[in-house]
Image (spheres, coloured by chain):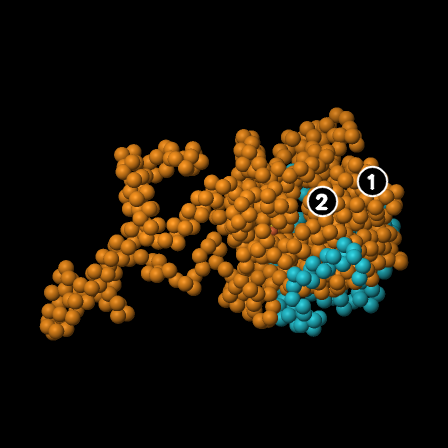
Chain colours: A cyan, B orange
Amino acid sequence: MTDSPRSRIFARVSRAQNEADATTIQRELEALGSAPTADLPAADISTAFLTNVLKNQGTVDCAANRSSAVKSVADYLYRHFRSHRLVAGNDPHLAAMPWREAGVLPRFGGVEPGEAVSLSYALLGVAETGAIVTVTGKANPAANNLLSEHHLVMVDSTRLVRDMEGAWERIRRETVKSGWPRGINFIAGPSSTADIEGKLVYGAHGPRQWHVILIGDVPATALEEARALAGQLNQGTS
Amino acid sequence: MASSDGCTSLKQTSNTFLDNAHEALQDAGKVERRNLMAYYMHIVRDAAVDQFGHFEDLRQHVKQVKQHSLEHLEYYLNQFEQAALQNGNHVHFAEDGDQLNSIVLDICQQHSARRIAKGKSMVTEETGLNDYLKRAGMKVVETDLGEYIIQQAGETPSHIVGPALHKSAAEVRELFFAKHDLGERELADTGEMVSEARRVLREHFLKAEVGIIGANALIAENGYSMLVTNEGNGDLCANLPNVLIVCTTLDRVVPRSEDATAMLRLLVRSATGQPQTCYTSFYSGPRREHDIDGPLETHIVLLDNRRTEILASDYREMLQCIRCGACLNHCPIYAGVGGHAYGWVYPGPMGSVLTPLLTSLEQSKALPNACTSCGRCAEVCPADIPLPDLLRDLRHDETRQKLSSSRWRLGMRLHAWLARHPTLYHAVTGLGIFTLHLLGRRKGSFASLPLAAGWTSQRDFPAPEGKTFMHQYSAMHREEKAREHKAAQALEQNTKAGPAAPRRTAQGRTPARRNGTERIEPSLRVDWPRKPDPRKPSGTRPRREGDDSASGKKPAAHPGGPRGKKPRRRPDHD
Ligand code: SF4
């Protein structure tokens, strides 16, 4: 191989270690097992997810079906903006929502500077961290996660996974067919910073508000319980 | 505005650490703020660690994965490179900072770029990239709020996670008034300042042609890089400009996606006490066919800058560092003097190890001595790096390379020689202590002492009681032996005289028996082992070789792996 920075670096790396073949390395790696994950705040996965979203300073709502999900979005928009406008990616799930029922007027595409509200349909929700997962692409342009002031996210309750390992397992199983996406984003809260005197401020560069709507079969008491748990746990740590 | 942009100076001043520290201690306001931060950061980190539940297991797991990755770095680096190329990236290797800088500049120039949006990256601080690009006429704007503040102020980071934590809100307010031409306004609180920075930087994001970010991990199996932020600024850099350059180092490679997120669990809790940052993103390359946004071209620059040398040395453990900043937050020296005193990019305990390794020991020989050996850094380090041991080894190197003062080395040699002659050692120390005892008997302490002026300038030295510890210890031992001897004699007499004669024991008391040995008089009971226990190593930190099997869930299941590695060799470079 030619004498390049690459070859010199590889030569130095190689000199610093013992040789081993791929099978041995793989075997060694597997023997290390998997990492412990964080305990969930509740046994029920929906409750745990909602609790952690709240602890991440998100706001939440539950919707039994698509109609009530749309209604929840309409309520949110009216409450904050007295409007019915928002931007959503070209996600088939979002396109199929009964928007008219609630009089919401989505524009499908990427957020343009100055547009205040965006809506994403999450690939997954992670109970361990209270994060939602999106992948870049037409269905959810990256700008939609980042440029709006309010980021709304719908998650189907069947798309909740316990932990980050569960998320990778799903991503591997489901997205590899269509090729790995350019970007995978775990989002857990509104954008924040503590860079001035350690004081926490929301809305650093990304959205100031982050609102998660959990759709589907969720225990009736999940939301109430999550609020109690988030309140309790927050008190416990502060 | 461009002309007043800050200029990050990388002139290394590590060797004037003592003067820097002295100066840092003069600003009472900053000292107070550092104390407050140090106090607060412990609490949030501890709470997050406790709430996780199995933090030590996690720590050991990630450490093993990191060690495994470093042990087979060639394999994983290759795998990462192949995957990254397949994802459509350009992959570059840079042996030193200059190479990285010129690779980045070339890319910018190829695209006739003028405006660059930069995410937080300690690696590019290390190479002085901003200055380099600025000299070539580029407008580089740091977009992490902390980095932006210090860039505007023309300063360097004081902390690897919170680079501008040394600045007060009032200072930031003045800075924004001076740098942002936005007319009359209040900027009454932190929120308003953040909003203003958001507005100013948003414009820059939308105009930038090139985005530069760092990476918290590189994933070998799929060529993704992990980016961890709370602000989302790194994601804006990675998604809005047409060209993206990821600048990172080759030791960031881990095998699988799960390894990156396992590391994330440690990193975030240790750094800010959160269970998860707001944005954890994985980027693989340029825009895909039907995407409507994202960069059109992506580059990954992998910097070595002596990391391969560290890999080959006995300081390899330092490459396990995940840059969480916990060792800074828990270091009494860092809390006292702040990050700038360390005189280069990386401060605190990790900086005191890294700076000599990445620059030279000669240029930074003061840093390994900026340590009280309290061991708190090693206790909290999520990567389980034995920082005090590494610092001690660097001090040892200093002595071997004759970098410490000749008087100091002479003293060390004298001490070493004496320590090898125990009888003489005890005689000399005994004499010394006795003399000090006689001299200081009346006052009980010394206000000044020859050869210890540094110590006594700050506090009085208590006068010794008269005898050395070893003297008292052996005396106690002798007494005890004598007592045992007497007791044994008495016992012998008793058995001869029959059971009716206990009154003949020493001091008229019956020696109590426990497990076949006489109980030591309560006043003489000692808790330490009678003889130094050879199995227990001495030093600042117990070695952890057996820990993973001893500490619980995960047995060390691969005898051939890094676990079974040789004990630490003395560094043998001269
Ligand atoms: S040395 Fe350990 S504690 Fe310090 S920054 Fe690195 S990982 Fe964190």
Q: Earlier in the sequence, mark 1 or mark 2?
A: 1
Q: Which residue is mark 2?
A: B127
Disc 1 marks a residue whose amino acid type is Arg
The quadrant of the rendering that contains the N terminus of chain A is bottom right
Q: Nearest the camera: B316 or B166?
A: B316
Q: Which residue is mark 1?
A: B115
Q: Residues within 10 Å of mark 2 (few under 14, many from 20)?
A: many
- Using the numbered discs, state the Cα–Cα distance from disc 1 to disc 2 in whole angstroms: 19 Å
- Residue B39 seen in the figure: no
SS category of the residue bearing label 2? helix
Label 2 marks a residue whose chain is B
Q: Do the residues at discs 1 and 2 belong to one chain?
A: yes
Q: Percent x, y for residue B320?
A: 62, 56
Q: Percent x, y for residue B162?
A: 64, 43
SS category of the residue bearing label 1? strand
Q: Nearest the camera: A53 or B172?
A: B172
Question: Residue at 26% across / 67% down in the picture?
Answer: B517
Residue placed furthest toward the top: B184
Q: Residues within 10 Å of mark 1 (few under 14, many from 20)?
A: many
Q: Nearest the camera: B12 or B360?
A: B360
Disc 2 marks a residue whose amino acid type is Thr
Asked whether the residues under the numbered discs 1 and 2 touch, taking CB atoms below 8 Å apart as contact, a structural biologist would say no
Cβ at disc 1 under 8 Å from ligand 1: no
Label 1 marks a residue whose chain is B
Query: Quadrant of the rendered structure where residue B435 is?
Result: top left
Question: Residue at 53% across / 45% down in the picture?
Answer: B402
When the figure is inspected, residue B552 is found, relative to residue B380, above or below; the finding is: below
Query: Quadrant of the rendered structure where residue B112 is?
Result: top right
Q: Percent x, y for residue B169?
A: 64, 33
Q: Percent x, y for residue B335?
A: 54, 41
Q: Nearest the camera: A126 or B277?
A: B277
